[in-house]
């Protein structure tokens, strides 16, 4: 370190400036408390992360699930879908009973199918409006309409002995498969967004081709 020698009685402005500059130089070399170590943070400046350190992003932070449908829509849909499951089982069982020659069982099942379709329609009417799900509503309504047709035609065949009505009932039953497939596809898409009906898988029976 260089020392500053001042002549006695001759401390002037130039001398003072030189002393200040020399003091600053000494401080810059680590000789004073003003020196800061590498990595220290200044006020208002965020410290940089070391290599390999990853800060969490908003996407990585788990957030509560927010359903895209209106409140109560899922509950109403699940109630309607549960009735659809019963309705389709009945439509399948009527054909089975006829193949086995049990007309009395088929007649009783036909009456139950008509009642189930009516119940499903009532539940569908309670479904809150949600425009994105309108195609699904139309599929459900279409399936209920086919169930009505199947029950009507089977009823005429079994109760009035009309043979042409049997073919009409079977034709309507075959059309159910064409509605069930897109309906279940739409439900699967909603399931990917969190839709679930506890204890009720998204599956519907379809009458076999006859």
Image (spheres, rainbow, N blue to C red):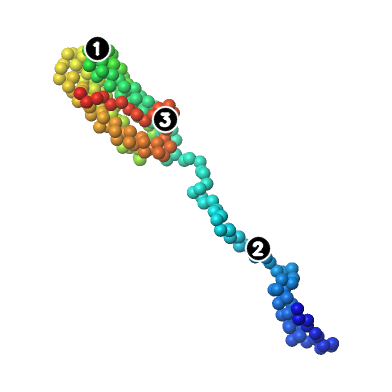
Residue 81 x %, y %: 36, 28
Q: Quadrant of residue 115?
A: top left
Report the mark closest to the observer, 2 or 3: 2
Residue hosting label 3: 197
* Residue 177 at least partly seen: yes
Label 2 crowding class (10 Å Cα cut-off): few <14, some 14-19, many 20+?
few
Above or below, 60 against 28 in this view is: above
For marks 1 and 2, give the CA distance. 89 Å
Question: Mark 3 touching mark 1, by CB under 8 A?
Answer: no
Residue hosting label 1: 102
Residue 60 x %, y %: 51, 48
Residue hosting label 2: 40
Question: In the rendered image, which quarter contains the N terminus?
Answer: bottom right
Label 3 crowding class (10 Å Cα cut-off): few <14, some 14-19, many 20+?
some
For marks 2 and 3, give the CA distance. 56 Å
Q: Quadrant of residue 180?
A: top left
Helix, strand or loop status at disc 2: loop
Closer to the camera, 174 or 76?
174
Closer to the camera, 65 or 24?
24
Helix, strand or loop status at disc 1: loop
For marks 3 and 1, give the CA distance. 34 Å
Mark 1 or 2, nearer chain start: 2
């Amino acid at each position: 370190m260089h020392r500053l020698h001042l002549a006695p009685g001759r401390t002037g402005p130039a001398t003072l400036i030189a002393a200040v500059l020399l003091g600053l130089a000494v401080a810059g070399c680590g000789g004073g408390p003003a020196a800061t170590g590498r990595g220290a943070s200044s006020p208002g400046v965020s410290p940089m992360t070391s290599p390999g350190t990853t800060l969490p992003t908003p996407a990585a932070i788990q957030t509560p699930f927010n359903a895209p449908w209106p409140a109560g829509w899922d509950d109403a849909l699940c109630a309607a879908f549960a009735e659809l499951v019963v309705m389709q089982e009945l439509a399948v069982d009527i054909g089975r009973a006829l193949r086995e020659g049990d007309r009395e069982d088929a007649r009783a099942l036909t009456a139950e199918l008509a009642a189930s379709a009516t119940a499903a329609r009532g539940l569908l009417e309670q479904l809150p409006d949600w425009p994105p799900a309108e195609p699904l509503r139309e599929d459900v309504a279409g399936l209920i309409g086919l169930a009505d047709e199947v029950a009507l035609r089977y009823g005429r065949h079994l109760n009035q002995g009309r043979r042409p009505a049997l073919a009409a009932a079977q034709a309507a039953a075959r059309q159910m498969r064409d509605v069930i497939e897109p309906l279940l596809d739409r439900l699967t898409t909603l399931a990917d967004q969190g839709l679930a009906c506890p204890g009720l898988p998204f599956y519907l029976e379809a009458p076999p081709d006859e």
